[in-house]
């Protein structure tokens, strides 16, 4: 078995048809701003993971919009 996947293994490809796109090996992953899911198709039909915010019990939590970094972390977490 190979080494664990890292954030740097996922290549940001820019926007494709208005959606942020990443690639890893022969697979592509897409995320739209204001969305909480990453898909493996441009139509958005095949969900591969959902984005979640990590809440802390020890500090005040702020609800914020998801970012490209959140999407990238969700993809890497799913592929590990």
Image (spheres, grey):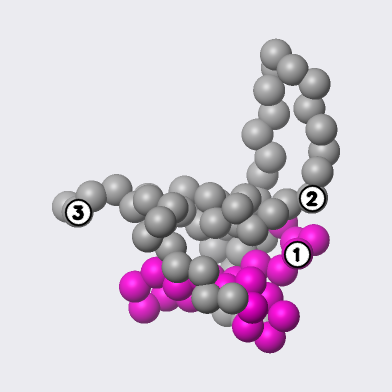
Gap in angstroms between the C-alphas marked 2 and 1:
8 Å
Residue 77 located within the stretch drawn in magenta: no
From the viewer's perspective, tell me whether residue 79 is left or right of residue 19.
Answer: left
Viewer-nearest of discs 2 and 3: 2
Q: Nearer the viewer, residue 40 or 20?
A: 20
Which mark sits nearer the N-terminus, 2 or 3? 3
Tell me: residue 11, above or below residue 64: below
Where's residue 11, x and y in %?
45, 68
Q: Which residue is mark 3?
A: 2
At label 3, counting other C-alpha atoms closer than 10 Å, the crowd grade (few under 14, some 14-19, many 20 or more) is: few
Tell me: residue 71, above or below residue 59: below
The answer to whether residue 34 is visible is yes
Where's residue 75, x and y in %?
51, 57
Which mark sits nearer the N-terminus, 2 or 1? 1
Residue 34 located within the stretch drawn in magenta: yes
From the viewer's perspective, tell me whether residue 3 is left or right of residue 67.
Answer: left
Q: Are marks 2 and 1 in contact (CB under 8 Å)?
A: yes
Residue occupying image coordinates x 70% and y 13%: 58
Q: Which residue is mark 2?
A: 65
Check disc 1 and report its element: helix, strand or loop.
loop
Magenta segment: 15-36
């Amino acid at each position: 078995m190979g080494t664990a996947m890292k954030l740097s293994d996922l290549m940001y490809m820019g926007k494709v048809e208005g959606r942020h796109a990443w690639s890893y090996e022969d697979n592509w992953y897409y995320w739209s701003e204001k969305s909480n899911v990453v898909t493996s198709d441009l139509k958005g039909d095949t969900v591969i993971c959902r984005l979640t915010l990590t809440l802390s019990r020890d500090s005040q939590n702020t609800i914020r919009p998801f970012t490209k970094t959140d999407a990238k972390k969700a993809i890497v977490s799913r592929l590990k």
